[in-house]
Amino acid sequence: MALLNLGTYPPKKCGIASFSYDLRESLLQAGSQVYVAAVSEGDVSYDYPQEVIYRLTQEQRVDYGATARLINASARIDAVIIQHEYGIFGGADGEYILDFVAQLKKPYVLVAHTVLPHPSPNQRAVLARLTLRAAATVCMTRRSARLLARTYAVPPRKVFVIPHGVPAFVPQDRELLKAKYGLVGRDVVTTFGLIGPGKGLENGIRAVAQLVDRYPSLMYWIAGGTHPVLLRREGERYREMLVDLVQQLGLEKHVTFVNHFLELDELGDYLYMTDIYLSPYPNRDQAVSGTLAYAMGCGRAIVSTPYEYALELLAGGQRGLVAAATTPEAIAVQMERLLAHPEFKRQLELHASEYGRTLSWSSVAGQYVALLDKVVRVHQAEVTA
């Protein structure tokens, strides 16, 4: 089976690009051939690897229909996977992707990374039209599946829940890693990912400020570079605001910034030396978080704000804790439960690790292969009928 993945792709640094790469690698290992159509901004030139056979400029509308026609003419592509997030395609709410699917004659599976419970009329229309033409729509939680049916009128038979995959991190000893990074005796809290205002890091910092008097060993690591799009538009304004906040609160000995994009090996270090993984996102509608999935896959004790993905992944309070609100006060309450009760934290880690094994990319790839194989067979039967 030969597939084409449409979305952002490395060396672009964003969550969808990382997801596209990991999905391709896992599908290759499962025996599929996977090519890539990469979407990029017009003012950036990426040195893409050889699997990228088509390139689309985000705001160049003509590229969308033209690429679809090239795919139609290609005998080596059986089906297309579209990674959907409103911000990666051109036009209002990424509506240029509709030109692509209008021209495409190969079957496609839509991977819905953002499923908003209260979309604008145009956001609802874009996603509804994409799902209407799709052979199947993949989302990553049951909550998103219910939203697709209720808000976007997608027939349940066309919706498939496949979790966000997690790379095969090599487990490491926490205390050895703390020694490596000069953190012996510290309680390490970590948040990683591309930095931007939607991450709620200021709330994480303020939560730490409420705890350091009682837990002076607390150290909060904020690891990751500023989102490239934000960096070009605003520079380091957001990060500088966070640094100023740390200074205002007198937390220089309790907050550390790691200001670059984390490759997998380094990311594994930060996760495995973590005592508490903090996911302080302020947007309650966030349907998925690769960073939270990674922390679960590494068996970390997690504290999160109450956004959609966290509410499902951490449901029941056995695999992690969800704060009652997105405020620093609510975050601090849950962090203190773990700091004050090490055995409770250890139990959370055990349950997170057990569940995290089900999120491995090898497991996730098997589910994609089964779905795509069915989509291709149904399409071929329709064509030959």
Image (cartoon, grey):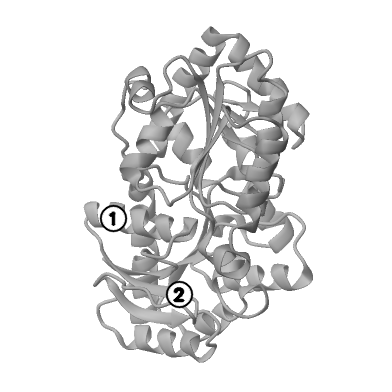
Instruction: Classify the position of the C terminus by image quarter.
Output: bottom left
For residue 13, above or below residue 54: above
Q: Secondary structure at mark 2?
A: strand
Q: Residue at x 36, y 71 (%)?
A: 79
Q: Position of residue 337 (x, y in %)?
A: 65, 15
In the rendered structure, the answer to whether residue 308 lies left or right of residue 298 reads right
In the foreground, 6 or 200:
200
Which labelled disc corresponds to residue 25? 1
- Going by the numbered disc 2, the residue's amino acid type is Val
Instruction: Classify the position of the N terminus by image quarter.
Output: bottom left
In the rendered structure, the answer to whether residue 109 lies left or right of residue 311 reads left
Residue 78 visible, this orientation: yes
Residue where numbered disc 2 is placed? 39
Query: Marks 1 and 2: in contact by CB < 8 Å?
Result: no
Q: Indicate which disc, 2 or 1, sits on the residue closer to the N terminus.
A: 1
For residue 253, above or below residue 133: above
Q: Residue at x 57, y 35 (%)?
A: 313
